[in-house]
């Protein structure tokens, strides 16, 4: 599948979508419902009511891209979005797994490593 390169944010729309929606409708939902500018490099993920279909929308700098996938068997295991949030945010590797039909809720991730913070004069003798 063609996708934008590098690191990008993926916003998952929490409500079911009518899969007849095209690029203009998806851009509108991205802006008005999710609250993000659809033309600034983010990826937006939408699912059908029965979770057998998914659509991805993003703008690549020259035009709007819409990809769709229909699972022939089974349903997408969509991560739960906390009540009251406008969208969920997932990582690019999670998107790949979701589109393969993998239940990502059963995966565990190591805690992110951050370097130890040191003050500007920490190594100076007193």
Image (tube, rainbow, N blue to C red):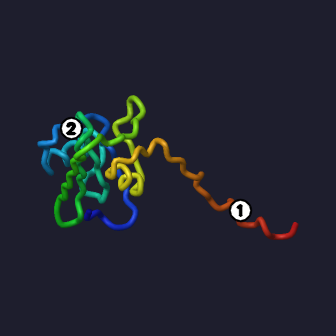
Residue that extends furthest to the front in the rendered view of this protein? 73
Q: Is residue 87 above or below residue 66?
A: above
Residue that extends furthest to the right in the rendered view of this protein? 126
Q: Residues within 10 Å of mark 1 (few under 14, many from 20)?
A: few
Would you name the residue on which mark 1 appears? 118
Residue 20 placement: quadrant: top left
At a point 21% along the width and 38% down the height, the residue shown is 17
Q: Position of residue 119 (x, y in %)?
A: 71, 62
Q: Quadrant of the C terminus?
A: bottom right
Judged from the image, the secondary structure of the residue bearing numbered disc 2 is loop
The reply, left or right, for residue 91 in relation to residue 40 is: right
At a point 38% along the width and 66% down the height, the residue shown is 6
At a point 19% along the width and 46% down the height, the residue shown is 26
Q: Position of residue 108 (x, y in %)?
A: 54, 47
Q: Residues within 10 Å of mark 2 (few under 14, many from 20)?
A: some
The reply, left or right, for residue 62 in relation to residue 104 is: left
Q: Position of residue 34 (x, y in %)?
A: 30, 41
Of callouts 2 and 1, the N-terminal one? 2
Q: How many marks?
A: 2
Q: Quadrant of the N terminus?
A: bottom left
Would you name the residue on which mark 2 appears? 17
Q: Is residue 20 above or below residue 66?
A: above
Residue that extends furthest to the top in the rendered view of this protein? 83
The reply, left or right, for residue 71 in relation to residue 83 is: left
Q: CA distance from mark 2 to mark 1?
A: 48 Å
At a point 22% along the width and 48% down the height, the residue shown is 55
Judged from the image, the secondary structure of the residue bearing numbered disc 1 is loop
């Amino acid at each position: 599948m063609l996708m934008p390169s590098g690191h990008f944010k993926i916003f998952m729309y929490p409500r079911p979508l009518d899969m007849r929606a095209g690029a203009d409708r998806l851009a509108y939902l991205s802006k008005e419902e999710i609250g993000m500018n659809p033309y600034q490099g983010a990826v937006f993920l939408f699912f059908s009511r029965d979770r057998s279909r998914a659509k991805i929308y993003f703008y690549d700098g020259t035009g709007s891209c819409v990809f769709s996938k229909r699972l022939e068997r089974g349903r997408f295991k969509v991560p739960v979005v906390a009540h009251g949030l406008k969208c969920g945010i997932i990582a690019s590797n999670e998107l790949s797994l979701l589109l393969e039909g993998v239940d990502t809720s059963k995966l565990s991730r190591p805690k992110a490593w951050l370097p130890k913070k040191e003050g500007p004069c920490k190594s100076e003798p007193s």
